Image (cartoon, rainbow, N blue to C red):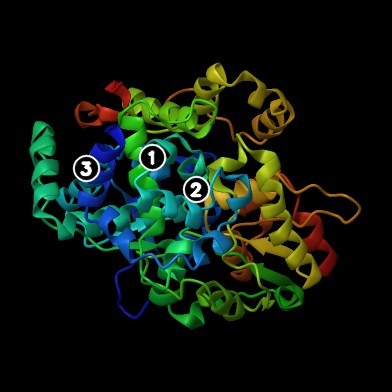
Amino acid sequence: MNGKSLTYGFFPGCAYATAAGYRESVDTVNRQLGIELVEIPDWNCCGATSVFSLNQDDALILAGRLFALAQAQGHEQILTVCNSCYTTLRKAGQMLAQSQTELSRVNVRLSAEGLTLNRLLPVRHYLEILYEDVPADAWSAGRPGYIGRLKVAAYYGCQLTRPWADLDHAERPALLDRFFSRLGFQAVDHSARTVCCGASHALPYEKDCRPMIRRIVEEARRRGAHFISTLCPLCQFNLDSLQKSGEAPPIPVPYFSQLAGLALGIPPQQLGFGKLLIPAENVIARVA
Amino acid sequence: MIDQRLAHEFLQSPKGVKLLHCIQCGTCSSSCPLAACMDHAPRELFALLRDGDMEAVLASNTPWYCVSCYQCMVRCPQEIPVTDIMYLLKQMAAERGMAPAGHKLPDLYRAFAREIEAHGRVSEALLMARYGAHRPFDMLGKAGLGLKLFARRRLELFPRNIHNRANLVLNANHQE
């Protein structure tokens, strides 16, 4: 692979373990491409929006501990697979980089377990690895013929491209669309790329969030998409579990890593497709 | 008096002071996916803030309906960190026990913070159990979904305890 090292310090985040086939597909794709994710030992929850909503010092400690653990392990960057982890770590990282007071306070706490934080490592999303670090020609070798017949609506969710990110435009992102085009899928143009899915409000306020889900799903349907593909466990869960089918059949919501596996010629069974709530394998079988 | 003290504290903070640039254009309210649920849409809340009506602001459900999508923040023509101001207001309310009792998000966030302190990592099933103890009715319709997740081996019924939890004692769990 051009001699470029594809080894990363990995922060899986809490939702990854039970996400619908995310881990299975990331593991399988990594094996095929020679990517190695080294899990940050003893990682804790990033705190997400919850802890930032209650207490800022707490939020900075949680994120600071992660940065310090990654630093202690000698990593050069931190890789995330979740929009919320991504934005939370980047936000906290920038706050700590801009405030010596906050950084010192975090370090006083961290010293209790022998950790020091003085390097705020860059935080990246797995999508960036697959798009930027993996050579483009790696995706064309084993591509099955049916891939080009699948239409995919790339769904970024809200947090990935918002203020602390540096990977794409805040409201008109294209990275995931370009990735799907590179994989050989038809990436459909649509207007719901960064429309919020309701996030954790969808549990206590499901009725209020349903219109948000409907907005995304109906737009994808109007554009003829076979799949809505996400890169965030919470987006995936909301879109997969809260689609009210009505008359039209629901649209499956596989992870971008599951589609990446398909493009590499890996059978869906090895990519965790069986864990999706809305089955996708019948759609694949229909076009294959 | 309490209003004055809180307004002072708010405007003293680096984020709060930026509110003074608000031109009341309403871009935030029109960008907000849940504005219709709020006691005061963001523009209106900012008018209250500038009036110094802090008790009304902190008692309102507005910041707790904020989903942190940051749409308002990337659009604000005055570069006001709208979402971060919502965070600041939630923190101020939570730290003083002033969060609106009728809103469910403070319960969800607290359940989340307690899971972190107890285990270091959050598993959805345990979080739901903790939250469901406060809001049992929210869990009623979820049994079918739970079974589906269980059948797909996607329910984690046991906590994932991390080794060193010394730094996970959170202020949020020990205030009020």
In the picture, measured across the screen, residue A148 lies left or right of residue B71, that is right
Q: Nearer the viewer, mark 1 or mark 3?
A: 1
Decide: few, some or many residues near mark 2? Use Cα within 10 Å; few <14, some 14-19, many ≥20.
many
In the picture, measured across the screen, residue A149 lies left or right of residue B50, that is right
Mark 3 sits on what residue? A65
Give the secondary structure at mark 3. Answer: helix
Outermost residue, top direction?
Answer: B133
Kindly indicate whether the residues beneath marks 1 and 3 are on one polypeptide chain: no
Q: Amino acid at mark 2?
A: Cys
Residue at image x 71%, y 25%? B143
Residue B3 visible within the image: yes
CA separation, marks 1 and 2?
10 Å
Residue at image x 40%, y 58%? B82
Mark 2 sits on what residue? B66
Q: Amino acid at mark 3?
A: Arg
Q: Amino acid at mark 1?
A: Lys
Residue A121 in the image, given as x and y percentages of width and height: 22, 60
CA separation, marks 3 and 2?
27 Å
Give the secondary structure at mark 1. Answer: helix
Residue A138 in the image, given as x and y percentages of width and height: 50, 77
- In the image, residue A133 sits, relative to residue A253, either above or below, namely below
Residue at image x 55%, y 47%? A199
Q: Are marks 1 and 2 in contact (CB under 8 Å)?
A: yes
Q: Give the quarter of the figure containing the N terminus of chain A.
A: bottom left
Mark 1 sits on what residue? B90
Q: Give the quarter of the figure containing the C terminus of chain A.
A: bottom right
